[in-house]
Amino acid sequence: MAAVAAATRWRLLLVLSAAGLRVTGAPQPPNILLLLMDDMGWGDLGVYGEPSRETPNLDRMAVEGMLFPNFYTANPLCSPSYTPQEIVGGIPDSELLLPELLKEAGYTSKIVGKWHLGHRPQFHPLKHGFDEWFGSPNCHFGPYDNKARPNIPVYRDREMVGRFYEEFPINLKTGEANLTQIYLQEALDFIKRQQAAHRPFFLYWAIDATHAPVYASRPFLGTSQRGRYGDAVREIDDSVGRILHLLRDLSIAENTFVFFTSDNGAALISAPRQGGSNGPFLCGKQTTFEGGMREPAIAWWPGHIPAGQVSHQLGNIMDLFTTSLSLAGLAPPRDRAIDGLDLLPTVLQGRLTDRPIFYYRGNTLMAVTLGQYKAHLWTWTNSWEEFRQGVDFCPGQNVSGVTTHSQEERTKLPLVFHLGRDPGERYPLSIASTEYLDALRWITPVVRQHQEALVPGQPQLNVCNRAVMNWAPPGCEKLGKCLTPPESVPEKCSWPH
């Protein structure tokens, strides 16, 4: 209780300070580290039951902090704005991103790794509040021939410093790449600089080693019982351990909130060599079954979050926006709907809040979870055409009438599962049962209220053009790396998933 009381006093001082009231000895707001993995599954960590137990640092982080078994992403793909090179659009200026708002509380912000919210310069991180960037606008796909398609650039701040498979090599045959070590050093250097300057900082560490083609540096290759994917996980685990160790060495661990999670479920289409595990859950990335959207999640804040806690709060990655603002003593913007929940009462006091989780695939609300009940309004894995070509999002997990290859509307009579008894979504409740009818009476008004309150957004991903690919990124002229783009031919994008 002492930790909770101290945290409450600290938040009161912070709110008063943010309101412009002079408070003697008002504390500096806590540093914020968001560690977002790429295609890492719920079942990839030892603390979630992975039998190889090859993640000692992340497991220790959970023991020292709070584990979330029921934490979800907002979308079963790498990004709400999943942007391959041909996409013309990106994150619009009208959106307020977390680093923009944190500036009001004096934060310096850096992104390390994959941005994925628009690769054209007008959409880059430094246009949206970040002060520093080291990483790439897209995933590390390739290598390309720089004729039909350019290799993906790597940026430092506003200018490219090379390209994947060129200045930043990835050996597809062996899986060797030094990128995780580079990303780790960028994080460590940033933390040291901000601590020396006594500035609060926000670090968004969005690395992609567990996204196919998976990679690891030489010291980690061949060290995992799980193959190359496990090598990548082991290197990530080691890196997280080194980051947390540095926070302790600098005596800022108790003033640094750290949250670890993933962007979507493991990509079973790439498993077992290039993909992870979603534990007991059905299917994986690109689907709205639990395996596609339930993520590993750990909160760590020594001296504030009581150690060894497990919270069954339904959480969502959008909550990190609201929670981070709360940490900084800032209120969310009032000119728009904010979907995220402030998780500070959960992590500091163990409070549970009833809230729904909505599962979207594109513009379609596919399912909703409320309490222990999940109702599927639509079911779909992928098309029969893709499936017959070997594209399988649910390998070895066919559930008749559930993992459908045609888009099945079930809005009148949803498939309902009790996720406590049936986390694998294999046994839908009988539509004639009292339990089914009670669950439906509970869920239906929540869905109706949500849909009535929706404000349509402007499409950002509907126009593609090969001419806007990464042919000549800013800074290419200094490196002699500019490429000639093809003729501009805008066309409607194709989204098969």
Image (spheres, rainbow, N blue to C red):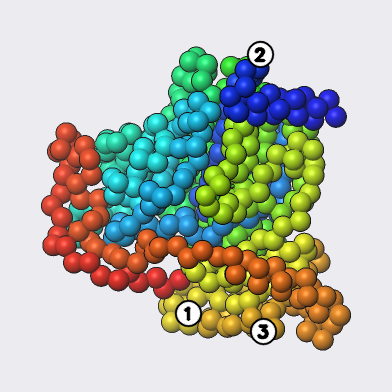
- Indicate which disc, 2 or 3, sits on the residue closer to the N terminus: 2
Look at discs 3 and 1 and give the one toward the viewer.
3
Q: Which mark is residue 132?
A: none
Q: Quadrant of residue 473?
A: top left
In percent of width and height, residue 212 lies at 45, 55
Look at discs 1 and 2 and give the one toward the viewer.
2
Q: Amino acid at mark 3?
A: Lys
**10 Å neighbourhood of mark 2: few (<14), some, or many (≥20)?**
few
Q: Amino acid at mark 1?
A: Ser
Secondary structure at badge 3 equals loop
In percent of width and height, residue 382 lies at 50, 75
Q: Is there a contact, CB below 8 Å, between mark 3 and mark 1?
A: no
Q: Report which residue position mark 2 lands on.
A: 25
Secondary structure at badge 1 equals loop
Q: Report which residue position mark 3 lands on.
A: 412
- Residue occupying image coordinates x 41% and y 73%: 496
- Indicate which disc, 1 or 2, sits on the residue closer to the N terminus: 2
Q: Nearer the viewer, residue 175 or 299?
A: 299
Q: Which mark is residue 383?
A: 1
Q: Mark 2 to mark 3: distance in Å?
A: 59 Å
In percent of width and height, residue 203 lies at 50, 33
- Residue occupying image coordinates x 45% and y 37%: 100
Q: Quadrant of the C terminus?
A: bottom left
Does the rendering let one see residue 179?
no
- Residue occupying image coordinates x 40% and y 41%: 128
* 310 in relation to 377, above or below: above
Q: Mark 3 to mark 1: distance in Å?
A: 23 Å
